[in-house]
Amino acid sequence: MNREHEPSIAASPTGDPYLLTPGPLTTSATVKEAMLHDYGSRDSYFIELNQRVMTNLVNMVNGQDTHVTVPLQGSGTFVVEAMIGNFVPRAGKLLICINGAYGHRIAKMCDYYERDYQIQESSEDVPIDVAVLNETLAQDATITHVAAVFCETTSGILNPLKAVADVVEKHNRGFLIDAMSAFGALPVDSTQIKFDAVVASSNKCLEGAPGMGFCIARQKALEKTQGNSPSLSLDLYEQWVTMTKTRQWRFTPPTHVLLAFDQAIFEFLEEGGVAGRGARYQDNCNTLVQGMREMGFRTLLPDELQAPIIITFHMPTNPEFEFDHFYNHLREQGYVIYPGKLTVAESFRIGCIGRLGEQQMRGALNAIRNSLDSFGITGKVS
Ligand SMILES: *Cc1c(COP(=O)(O)O)cnc(C)c1O
């Protein structure tokens, strides 16, 4: 017997509320349907499918001749941690560019793994300062690697990936990228940007189900990481060697997640890859920001720093506005938003990624208008 799903007013084709969050996200009905099969990890169909997913992922960075995909079970954080543990050797030193919670999380990983590190921090609404980075690398030859977050999901800010990569390359250090919330929507092209590793997951802009991450590594850099990993299950080198030899994952693969991921990538390619997906998200972002501004909401970031992924809005100061009621009221209307995670300001966030388009963005704006009306805020919120 199926469990009853809670009905909501605006519902996706499978009756679920729309997720305007940084993940997990709304997926297409066909992606969900792809999971209705059981495959053993040695099944030849599954092995072919797995191979196709890995190849498609490396193609997304234009790295078919130089790079390899190493998948990993778990949420996105697992593969970020795996990247840090594998690529920064015990005697290495990592410079972490931080402007949000995900950068801080990388520093915490270094604490756990006892890897030497240094941080270059800017405020959550300020992008990475490339001149400062250049200066630091020029002065400190002990720094072996630099880590940066592409879209810092904490605020939704877009960091200047290409400029950072160019400085790191100029100083001949390894570059490690957390592109979790942008991969698939914003280009990460290995022929334009030099990096040792980039990580992302199945369930953000690629619109698959949550449950696995992947690392796309420059093969020459990955080959040098044997024995670095302080963790058995997060050892990307061993995962890669095993998969190269046996075409299988080292431990139980998340088979259903891979079935969904293969379908999700098919839909991604049909949409026109990064260009097509990025354009839909940009439209979503524009619709949302414009509609919210018309109601009096203010964005944290100026438009030129805003990635089309998730938007941070200042918390209104109207005494009638109450966030928990607002959140619940939107949820009842079928739209799930996200609380803020900033330290600089009271805020909340609305995502524009996942299987959402113009219709869902307009629906969310209408629901927000309804909520303001229900608070007795009839004009603009302040
Ligand atoms: C989502 C995200 C992660 C991973 O988060 P999980 O909750 O572990 O999936 C890491 N970095 C960034 C920038 C993210 O947006």
Image (cartoon, rainbow, N blue to C red):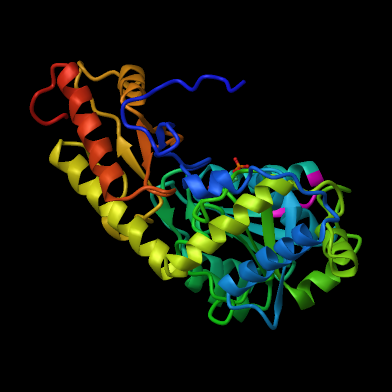
Q: Quadrant of ligand 1?
A: top right
Query: In the image as oriented, which residue stretches furthest toward the left?
Result: 379
Locate residue 327, reporting x and y percent.
35, 24
Locate residue 170, reporting x and y percent.
60, 80
Q: Quadrant of residue 74?
A: top right
Locate residue 164, reporting x and y percent.
52, 69
- Let me know if residue 116 is in the magenta part: yes
Asked whether 266 or 86 is in front, the reply is 266
Count of all numbered marks drawn on residues in the image: 0
Query: In the image as oriented, which residue stretches furthest toward the front?
Result: 1
- Let me know if residue 264 is in the magenta part: no
Locate residue 241, reporting x and y percent.
88, 66
Q: Residue at x 70, y 51 (%)?
A: 79
Q: Is residue 307 left or right of residue 141?
A: left
Q: Residue at x 51, y 19 (%)?
A: 4
Instruction: Specify whether residue 88 is in view.
Output: no
Q: Residue at x 66, y 79 (%)?
A: 64
Asked whether 361 or 165 is in front, the reply is 361
Q: Which residues are magenta?
A: 113-117
Q: Is residue 49 left or right of residue 158?
A: right
Say which quadrant the C terminus sits in: top left
Q: Is residue 299 left or right of residue 109?
A: left
Q: Quadrant of residue 294?
A: top left
Vertical position of residue 44 compared to residue 168: above or below: above
Q: Is residue 16 left or right of residue 250?
A: left
Say which quadrant the N terminus sits in: top right
Instruction: Specify whether residue 108 is in view.
Output: yes
Asked whether 288 or 356 is in front, the reply is 356
